[in-house]
Image: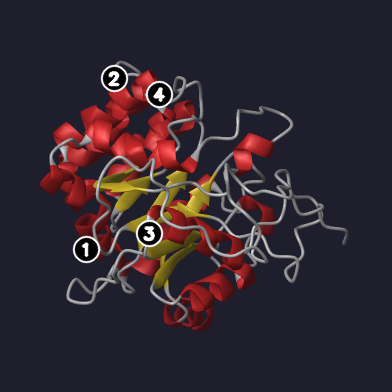
Amino acid sequence: MQHPTRRAVIGTGLALAATPALAADPRVSFKVPDGVCDSHLHVYDARFPYMPNAVLRPPLATVADYKVLQKKLGITRAVVVQPSTYGTDNSCTLDAIAQLGDARGVCVVNASVSDGELKRLHDGGIRGARIQFGLGNPVGADEVLPLARRIAKLGWHIQCNMPPEQLVQMEALLLSLPVPVIIDHLARAVDTGSPQYGTVRRLLDSGRGWVKVSGAYLYNGGTPPDYAGASAAARGYITAAPERCIWGSDWPHPDATKALNPVAMPDDVILLNLTMRWAPDEKLRHRILVENAEKFYGFDPTKRPKSF
């Protein structure tokens, strides 16, 4: 299969791996604490072919490229999320976890996955299964409950990325699952009055729901540097359940290259600085950037890697 040509630059200001690593970006507006976890990134590597029928086919973005961003922002832990581009073949995600070291991952599997494969994925650092509708749908809605029952014994969670109307329709099911549920990218909420915002609030109120305060630049969330609409939703979630909100970069921003619905490539420094706007209190920001991810993904709080 022919892969896309690697871009000269991935994201804003990210040099290729052949270039010396960047120093910490002076535009970061706060002191980055040790053990910050980026809970949402994707890796696209030429060694692992894209699905022939993949809807989203972004440019390549390797672990070496991501390490440049880590040094630039001071991020020291990562959660690699299986992108729709690879379907249920989690080989690239497992390889990225192994390369990154202090990392975890979220896979895509359906309800027919074998126990042996689940064990292999767990041993490789996987801690959750992603349900994603709208980009090929490798896991059907009718498989969510059977899959949740399968992964419950591993201590995994279900991660959801889907159109708002589908999330709202599945609210009762998500509330009934025997595992924690985390919602991607603010549930695409760009205000506090939308139905999907209400669904997430009820999930948070249940004590089993979590949300990624990520992807502010998506879904008409506003314009930089404040992304006012998305920021309103993020602050609402953080106020309601600060102990169950987790930050992620969404690097390398594959939706920004999607021909069907392009958005401007965001500046990763601005996306990190948003946490200062959402959580100006240092202790609260530390919880969102460090502590919550430790609890959710099983990182050791006594072994926080030093910020670059």
Q: Give the CA separation, mark 2 to mark 4.
A: 14 Å
**Can you give x and y, in whole percent of width and height, for residue 92 in the image?**
62, 69
36 versus 122 height, above or below: above
Which quadrant is the C terminus positioned in? bottom left
- Assess whether mark 3 and mark 4 are in contact (beta carbons under 8 angstroms): no
In the picture of the structure, the residue carrying the numbered disc 2 is 192
**Label 1 vs 2, first from the N-terminus:** 2
Q: Which mark is residue 260?
A: none
- Assess whether mark 3 and mark 1 are in contact (beta carbons under 8 angstroms): no
In the picture of the structure, the residue carrying the numbered disc 4 is 227
In the picture of the structure, the residue carrying the numbered disc 3 is 75
**Label 1 vs 4, first from the N-terminus:** 4
Q: Which residue lies at the image location 37% right of the left edge and 59% below the top edge?
A: 75
Q: Which mark is residue 295?
A: 1
Q: Nearer the viewer, residue 174 or 79?
A: 79
Mark closer to the observer (2, 4): 4
Secondary structure at numbered mark 3: loop
Q: Which residue lies at the image location 34% right of the left edge and 19% below the top edge?
A: 191
Amino acid of disc 2? Thr
Mark closer to the observer (2, 3): 3
Mark closer to the observer (1, 3): 3
- Assess whether mark 2 and mark 1 are in contact (beta carbons under 8 angstroms): no
Mark closer to the observer (4, 3): 3
- Assess whether mark 3 and mark 2 are in contact (beta carbons under 8 angstroms): no
Q: Which residue lies at the image location 19% right of the left edge and 71% below the top edge?
A: 301
Secondary structure at numbered mark 1: helix
12 to the left or right of 170: right
Secondary structure at numbered mark 4: loop
